[in-house]
Amino acid sequence: RELQVNLRDRSYPIYIGEGILDEIASLFEKHDIRKASPLMIVTDEHVAPVYLDRITQSLMAGGYQVASYVVAAGERSKALSVLEDIIGAALDAGLDRSSAIVALGGGVVGDLAGFVAASYMRGIRFVQIPTTILAHDSSVGGKVAVNHPKAKNIIGAFHQPELVLYDTATLRTLPEREIRAGLSEMIKHGLIWDAEFTAWLDQHAEEILALEHDKLEYGLYMGCQVKAYVVSQDEKENDLRAILNLGHTIGHALEAVAGYNELLHGEAISIGMVGSAKLAVRMGRSVRIYTETKRILAKFGLPVRLPEHLDTDRIMKAMMHDKKFKEGRTVFVLPTEIGRVEINKQVPVEWVREVVEELK
Ligand code: NAD
Ligand code: ZN
């Protein structure tokens, strides 16, 4: 399957399917990745042993000069110090303004390598090779960033890739917990945009969790399509793009308070989406929104309750970093029905607090 992300001044393709990496060199060539300058693959210690050699060989056989850099797995690699190390390696490998950075891995590698590409020599080409389910979200749309100890994704840029190569064969080595966490963003894409897709996800949960090929590929395709469409309407998040943050206000606060190891991103936003649905009901929406959101997420084995030991005060404080609070009210992405959301600027902070408390 192939999809196009159409932005105001350019567009780029997303290829999704089994075995796409077998054609990597010719796809690179087709999309103007230059052979005259070296390119650098950035990946992590879990992905490297399985895929790095194979991809390096294919690219070299196609006439590319290839360097690589392997980071530690996990959120902690999204850091300025790691960025600096990669840039040092890029200089040593002779990367120039016509070079490309290749992100091979999940969202951590994609965000990190993308920010290397955005900042090295004021911006060079960049290719996304997502290898997690979550990365159907992170590899599309051009948001790239590293974290600051005080806040997640706070040092970053908008930098779109030249192309996205999504080889579904790579997903077979994913740990089960990562599979579920990645599906959380896929469900989010249904919940914000497409009731029919949400119903399809609900109906095929077992097959998708078992990574049955056709179902998984269709789900990734639909998820990427929603993301690509929203981003094409609003690349720099002036308005519409904010709907992609469903579940993320609470979710990011939970990640910060729980520590990035206890809750995976997808797990945190699962709880966040249940919280948003609860809040929507408070604001007068049908209770069905809450029961359905919770039921579907639970069906995919995702957490729908807050770990009890997480302190509500600390969660609220972490949310303040993320948000403007004006006269006791704040902005939230809230569901209005399954498959539709609104951006509500009048949510009472007190109600947010009560909902967080009730999530335990
Ligand atoms: P991740 O990159 O840490 O990958 C999860 C784990 O799976 C890691 O341990 C990784 O080494 C391992 N892994 C990756 N591919 C594998 C494979 N094929 N086989 C076996 N193991 C594999 O995490 P993630 O969930 O992919 O991404 C989360 C990150 O994405 C967060 O930092 C989040 O902020 C970011 N994100 C960014 C955007 C965006 O628009 N830029 C959107 C959503 C999330
Ligand atoms: Zn997310």
Image (tube, rainbow, N blue to C red):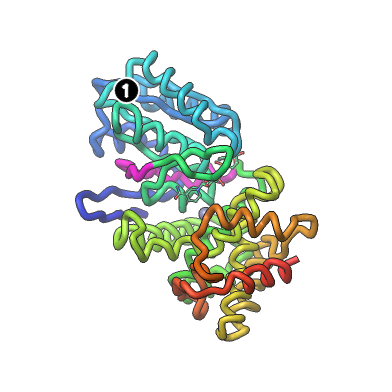
Position of 332 with respect to 67 (left or right) is: right
Residue furthest to the left in view is: 9
Estimate the x, y position of residue 91 in percent, counting from the top left: 37, 17
Q: Residue 159 lies in magenta, yes or no?
A: yes
Q: Position of residue 19 (x, y in %)?
A: 44, 42
Residue that mark 1 sits on? 64
Q: In the picture, residue 244 is in which quadrant? A: bottom left
Q: Residue at x 43, y 28 (%)?
A: 41
In the rendered image, the quadrant that contains the N terminus is: bottom left
Percent coordinates x, y for residue 179 in the rendering: 61, 51
Q: Quadrant holding ligand 1?
A: top right
Would you call the spot at circle 1 few (<14 residues within 10 Å), some (14-19), or many (20 or more)? many
Residue at 40%, 63% in the rendered image: 226
Query: What's drawn in magenta, residue-wise?
Result: 157-172
* Observer able to see residue 106: yes
- Asked if 203 appears above or below 137 in the picture, the reply is below
Instruction: Classify 133 as above or below 225.
Output: above
Residue at the extreme front: 327
In the rendered image, which quarter is residue 352 located in? Answer: bottom right
Q: Under tag 1, what secondary structure?
A: loop
Q: Which amino acid does the dot numbered 1 rest on? A: Tyr
Question: Residue 223: image x %, image y %?
Answer: 45, 60
| Name of the residue lying farthest toward the top | 92
Report the residue at 49% width, 59% height from top. Answer: 214
Of 137 and 287, nearer the camera is: 287
Q: Residue at x 40, y 37 (%)?
A: 114
47 or 337, nearer to the observer = 337
